[in-house]
Image (cartoon, helix red, strand yellow):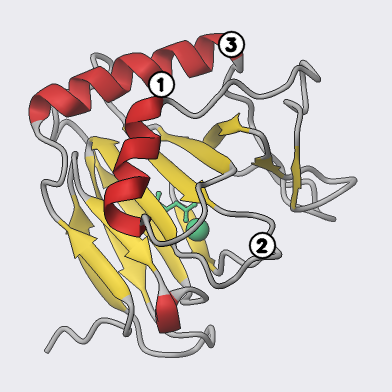
Amino acid sequence: MLVLPKGFRHIPGFLDRDRQEALVEEIRAVVAAAPLYRPAMPKTGKDLSVRMTNCGTLGWVTDKALGYRYQPQHPVSQEPWPAIPQSLLDLWQTVAGAYKPPQACLVNFYAETARMGLHQDKDEQDLQTPVVSVSLGDACLFRVGGRERNDRTVSFKLSSGDIVVLGGESRLAFHGVDRIYPATSTLLKNGGRINLTLRRVTP
Ligand code: SIN
Ligand code: FE2
């Protein structure tokens, strides 16, 4: 039986194709202003396979020297991050409207072979507000567990237009992306998957 952690929501097909296409255009504009860069793990300096950028007043970044953190500028260009597109703020209003608006939107780009190891989102001072994430492009195998790394996990596919909410007891649930399913969507011309993660950072 598939037992999801309490407060975890998966909303398949939240965005229809037209809204997905409109959102991709908005993300293209974000990436034009704040190019994707290759983040590195703290201490080891090992590259992540996912490329990243952000929009919002704060962005989540990581590198060898300073590790995981939020900062108001792009780590390469040192420019302020572009604003979060209105359509994402509207989406937040619909699924997490009881909470203050998001300050950060992490843009993750997964090429065919990229993945993301099991981790918790815990670099935010505010751990009450849910984390809301949107999937675009190729499907992936997503995994979510409990608050301890060794808790049982459940895996399922996330497709383009799906939303995931990590709220309540699942706010600190371990989660990750085991693999991308190449060529499962026609949304992105050159394939791959985009994940947008909206977060409140300060209370
Ligand atoms: C993340 O946890 O930052 C990304 C999750 C995803 O790609 O669905
Ligand atoms: Fe995460």
Q: Which mark is residue 73?
A: none
Res. 194 in view: no
The residue pinned by badge 1 equals 27
Q: Earlier in the sequence, mark 1 or mark 3?
A: 1
Circle 1 SS class: helix
Q: Left or right? Give the position of 61 relative to 177.
A: right
Q: Earlier in the sequence, mark 3 or mark 2?
A: 3
The residue pinned by badge 2 equals 203
Label 1 and label 3: CA atoms lie apart by 10 Å
- Mark 1 vs mark 2, foreground winner is 2
Asked if the residue under mark 3 is in contact with the one under mark 1, i.e. CB atoms within 8 Å, the reply is: no
Amino acid carrying mark 2 in the image: Pro
- The quarter of the image holding the C terminus is bottom right
Q: Quadrant of residue 82?
A: top right
Amino acid carrying mark 3 in the image: Ala
Circle 2 SS class: loop
Label 3 and label 2: CA atoms lie apart by 28 Å
Q: Residues within 10 Å of mark 1 (few under 14, many from 20)?
A: some
Q: What residue is shown at x 79% (from left), y 54% (from top)?
A: 42
Q: Quadrant of residue 154?
A: bottom left
The residue pinned by badge 3 equals 33
